[in-house]
Image (tube, rainbow, N blue to C red):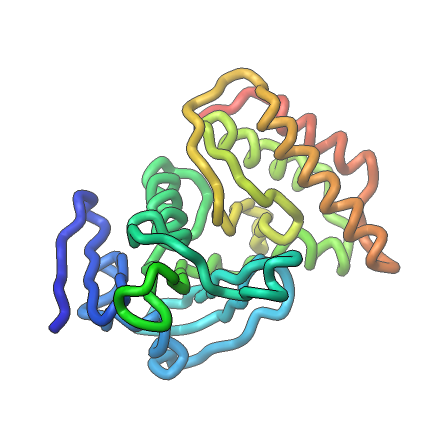
């Protein structure tokens, strides 16, 4: 039997059954199964498509319950991936990586920051219900018509105003104390109107509102620049220049108004 609980936030409920914990927005999902993201979502989806570029985990575009969304499994990278690709250790489901990202996204969404609205997140115990090991998944709304900055730069030049807007966007997050652990060209989205969104806040953190630059802010920016330079080396045509970076920094250094 499912156990359903109303969370402190009006935007979320959670249910659990057989070692699966599902945190979800009841306005977007009606009576989901606790195992929805572990086993059932691709079967229930009206449409799905594997995303082959960008991001840390294995991800799909899906349409489920009338919602166009992105479904992502949390996957390890680096050397650890050779040993253990998608299993994590943790006794408290509230500390699961997907749950923490869901709550962070909801906080940012409520603050008006340009992030996708979280739909659901799950932690499921493996290989049995009381195991200390778990696998994690998340479902967030898809940004209509958006591409990653990385994808766009392999196709064409973007103008200086867009670079300035990217810098302004990053500064908005920093002024709210939002630390993005993996700020790179694949985690910045631009839509047809060049509206900017940031995605993938796995291992992100809230560090308190900051009006002045701090080392972690500078490290975030340098990580982004390294990702752009790395991609530039990997592609024969990659439309990024030092002048583009200067425009981004000019936008970042402008005062932010909410």
Instruction: Residue at 55% x, 45% y: name it.
Output: 196
Q: Is residue 54 left or right of residue 131?
A: right
Residue 72 lies, in percent from the top left, at 47, 64
Q: Is residue 10 left or right of residue 48?
A: left
Q: Pick the residue in front: 151 or 96.
A: 96
Farthest residue, direction bottom: 43
Q: Is 64 located above or below residue 101 in the figure?
A: below
Residue 56 lies, in percent from the top left, at 57, 58
Instruction: Residue at 13% x, 56% y: name it.
Output: 5
User: Based on the displayed image, in which of its 4 quarters is residue 19 positioned?
Assistant: bottom left
Q: Quadrant of the C terminus?
A: top left
- Can residue 214 be seen here? The reply is yes
Q: Pick the residue in front: 235 or 39.
A: 39
Residue 76 lies, in percent from the top left, at 56, 59
Q: Is 159 located above or below residue 58 in the figure?
A: above
- Can residue 137 be seen here? The reply is no
Q: How many marks?
A: 0
Q: Is residue 232 left or right of residue 25?
A: right
Residue 216 lies, in percent from the top left, at 58, 27
Farthest residue, direction right: 236
User: Based on the displayed image, in which of its 4 quarters is residue 243 positioned?
Assistant: top right
Q: Pick the residue in front: 160 or 174.
A: 174
Q: Quadrant of the N terminus?
A: bottom left
Farthest residue, direction top: 212
Q: Is 7 located above or below residue 175 in the figure?
A: below
Instruction: Residue at 70% x, 34% y: name it.
Output: 222
């Amino acid at each position: 039997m499912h156990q359903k609980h109303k969370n402190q936030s009006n935007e979320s409920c959670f249910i659990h059954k057989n070692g699966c914990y599902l945190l979800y927005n009841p306005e977007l999902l009606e009576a989901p199964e606790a195992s929805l993201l572990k086993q059932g979502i691709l079967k229930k989806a009206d449409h799905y498509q594997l995303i082959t570029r960008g991001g840390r985990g294995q991800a799909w575009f899906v349409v489920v319950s009338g919602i166009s969304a992105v479904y992502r499994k949390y996957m390890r990278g680096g050397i650890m991936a050779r040993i253990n690709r998608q299993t994590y250790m943790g006794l408290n489901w509230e500390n699961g990586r997907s749950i923490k990202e869901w709550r962070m996204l909801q906080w940012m969404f409520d603050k008006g920051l340009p992030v996708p609205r979280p739909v659901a997140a799950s932690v499921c115990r493996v290989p049995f219900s009381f195991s200390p090991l778990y696998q994690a998944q998340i479902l967030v709304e898809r940004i209509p018509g958006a591409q990653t900055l990385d994808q766009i730069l392999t196709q064409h030049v973007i103008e200086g105003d867009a670079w300035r807007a990217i810098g302004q966007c990053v500064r908005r997050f920093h002024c709210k104390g939002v630390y993005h652990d993996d700020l790179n060209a694949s985690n910045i989205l631009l839509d047809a109107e060049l509206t900017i969104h940031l995605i993938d806040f796995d291992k992100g953190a809230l560090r308190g509102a900051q009006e002045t630059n701090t080392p972690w802010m500078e490290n975030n920016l340098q990580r982004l620049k390294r990702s752009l330079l790395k991609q530039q080396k990997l592609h024969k045509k990659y439309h990024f220049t030092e002048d583009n970076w200067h425009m981004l920094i000019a936008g970042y250094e402008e005062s932010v108004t909410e």
